[in-house]
Amino acid sequence: MSDLDKFLEKIKNNVKIEPKDWMPDGYRKHLQRQMSQHAHSEIIGMQPEGNWITRAPSLRAKVILLAKIQDEAGHGQYLYSAAETLGKSRDEYIHELQTRKAKYSSIFNYPTLTWADMGAVGWLVDGAAIVNQVSLQKTSYGPYSRAMVRICKEESFHQRQGYEIMSQMAFGTAEQKEMAQDALNRFWWPSIMMFGPHDADSARSGDAMKWGIKVESNDELRQRFIDKTVQQAEIIGLTIPDPDLKWNEEKGSYDFGKMDWDEFWQVVKGNGPCNDQRINHHIKAHEEGTWVREAAIAYAKKNN
Amino acid sequence: MDNQGDIWEVFIQSKPGLAHKHVGSVHAMGKEMALQNARDMYTRRQEGTCIWVAKHEDIVASVPEEDGSFFEPSNDKIYRHATHYVMPEGAKNI
């Protein structure tokens, strides 16, 4: 049996691929790209929420938000650590992010304008991420799968804290409810586009499914998220900004309107409202940490 | 590119009495920092009672697939399992 046959046999039998196993070059490259993109999303995703730490409306809200952002830092680290097992260094991954060769989830290129956005981000953005990550627990690459299991376990509170904020505001004053609705209006479409292009237009999906990196398609995951979320909006009296959203009795799920893929690709290409701000901030923070790394190396040398 | 230190593999014991289990890795410039980073990264919810860290480069690993012969000696020694022995009918608690 050739190396490739053995590899495909493992995928077929749901045997995880481990770092030292033989794997096709395309598999390794696909995972390096996907896992680092996932890691970068966790790290860049701290910025829109970090924006509200100093202005959280209560001490309780503040400590929760801090804990959530700290988790995201941790999740980024888990993913970088798993991605490094593919034979590429942390430095290379970070360099690709900072030079914009690597992407991160486009949703983080939108600004967080009001406190209600902290609700929308937790409820919708983390909600969509969880649907994706629960599915990825079954991915064929061992370190990625284990990182997903750990992340899903920790993330259960993230979506709930967001939904709690949304419901508090939706049941608050008229002004607060308006803020909540406005946040939903702005985050709904980018959230459902987080799952990526339609299956028919997704260039890399074929390989990813064939190799067991992805076990469910973009459209299947998007549908699951929408079906879960509509009722949650209804019971707090908010309206999903999609006039075409309608229960389809026959297929047992919601029909929904057309997504604006032109906007999506514009943001991916770097023309979203906050792309420059996010990357520049990352570079600044990284450069400002140089002296810490240098001092730590000097200290370690002195003590060895 | 800059120096972010060595990779250290992290093992956590979740309860006294249980084996330490590999959870992932951290970057650090020395033993103490590795331990502190591992604590911050992998035990934010009191996941453990003890942490081990070991430099990645110091870990020696067998290669599961390419080295089938490595574990072969145990393949044909089924007499090492209790299920190999036939017990007389009616024998209990054995």
Image: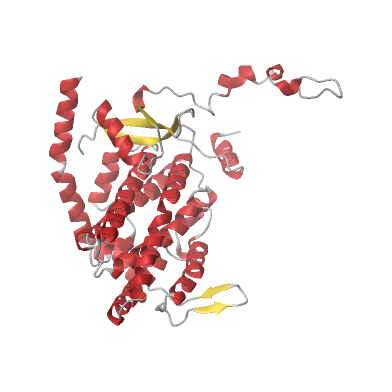
Q: Residue furthest right?
A: B89
Q: Residue furthest front?
A: A59
Is residue A83 found left or right of A274 in the rendered image?
Answer: right
Identify whether B82 is placed above or below A196. Answer: above
Provide residue A228's location: percent of width, then percent of height.
50, 67
Is residue A15 found left or right of A37 in the rendered image?
Answer: right
Camera-side residue: A53 or A78? Answer: A53
Is residue A281 found left or right of A253 in the rendered image?
Answer: left
Give the residue at x 38% y 30%: B50
Give the residue at x 22% y 61%: A51
Quarter of the picture holding the N terminus of chain A:
top right
Give the residue at x 17% y 23%: A301
Residue B49 visible at all: yes
Provide residue A157's location: percent of width, then percent of height.
40, 56
Provide residue A218's location: percent of width, then percent of height.
48, 61
Quarter of the picture holding the C terminus of chain A:
top left
Identify whether A241 is placed above or below A82. Answer: below
Identify whether B19 is placed above or below A259. Answer: above
The quadrant holding residue A276 is: bottom left
The colour mode here is: secondary structure
Camera-side residue: A298 or A219? Answer: A298
Provide residue A226's location: percent of width, then percent of height.
48, 69
Give the residue at x 71% y 21%: B82
Residue A103 visible at all: no
Camera-side residue: A87 or A126? Answer: A126
Counting the numbered discs, the total is: 0
